[in-house]
Structure formats: C-alpha cells, structure tokens
Image (spheres, rainbow, N blue to C red):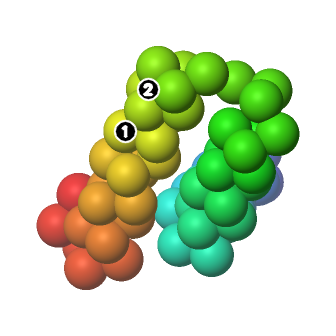
Amino acid sequence: MLMIGWVLRQVVAAAEREYYDPANIQRALADLENRLDLGEIDEKEFERQEDALLDRLEEARQWANGTL
C-alpha cells in the first residue's frame, strides 16, 4: 500500500512539472498563434485560449517559486 502512494506522488509530481514547464506553455502559445494565422481558429477563440495559457504561465512562475 505504501508503494502505491509513492508511485502516485511520483506521477502527480511528473504531471505538475510538465504542466507548469514554461517551455511547454510557450510552445502552446506559438502553436495557438500558428492556428490563428492558418485560419483554423478565429480571433475570439485565440484570445480565450491565449488568456488561459497566460494564466497558466503565471501559475507556473508561482509554482516554481513555491508560492502556488
């Protein structure tokens, strides 16, 4: 039972590192801009997703500083 808890903590920690990785967020922002340029999404959808990614980037900074 203790091993399962340890494994779960490791999985959560890895997921947090990936989610809060600024490089991943920057790539997502670049991909989003590319989708707008290609006409795959409209300006309203772009702004909605961009806002969410910028919020995530701020959360990532707080997470990295231990203030989240």
Q: In the rendered image of this protein, does residue 17 appear above or below residue 36?
A: below
Residue corresponding to mark 1: 51
In the rendered structure, the answer to whether residue 55 lies left or right of residue 34 reads: left
Marker disc for residue 21: none
Outermost left residue: 67
What residue is disc 2 on?
Answer: 48
- The three-letter amino acid code for the residue at tag 2 is Arg
At x 23% / y 58%, what residue is drawn? 68
Q: Judge whether residue 15 can be spotted in this image.
A: no
Left-right relation of 1 to 52: right
- The kind of residue tagged 1 is Asp
Q: 19 or 38, which lies in front?
A: 38
Q: Residue at x 44, y 26 (%)?
A: 48
The reply to whether discs 2 and 1 touch (Cβ–Cβ < 8 Å) is yes
Residue 14 placement, left or right of 67: right
Q: Which residue sits at x=33%, y=47%?
A: 55
39 vs 6, nearest the viewer: 39
Name the foreground residue: 30 vs 14: 30
- Can residue 34 be seen at all in this image of the molecule? yes
The spot of residue 26 in percent (x, y) is 59, 67
Q: Residues within 10 Å of mark 2 (few under 14, many from 20)?
A: few
Residue at x-position 25% and y-position 67%: 62
Task: Examine the image and state in which quarter residue 24 appears.
Answer: bottom right
Rounded to the nearest angstrom, the CA distance separating label 2 from label 1 is 5 Å
User: Where is residue 10 drawn, in percent x and y?
Assistant: 69, 61
Q: What element carries label 2?
A: helix
Quarter where residue 42 is shown: top right
Residue closest to the eye, 24 or 51: 51
What x and y, as percent, mark residue 1?
Answer: 74, 41
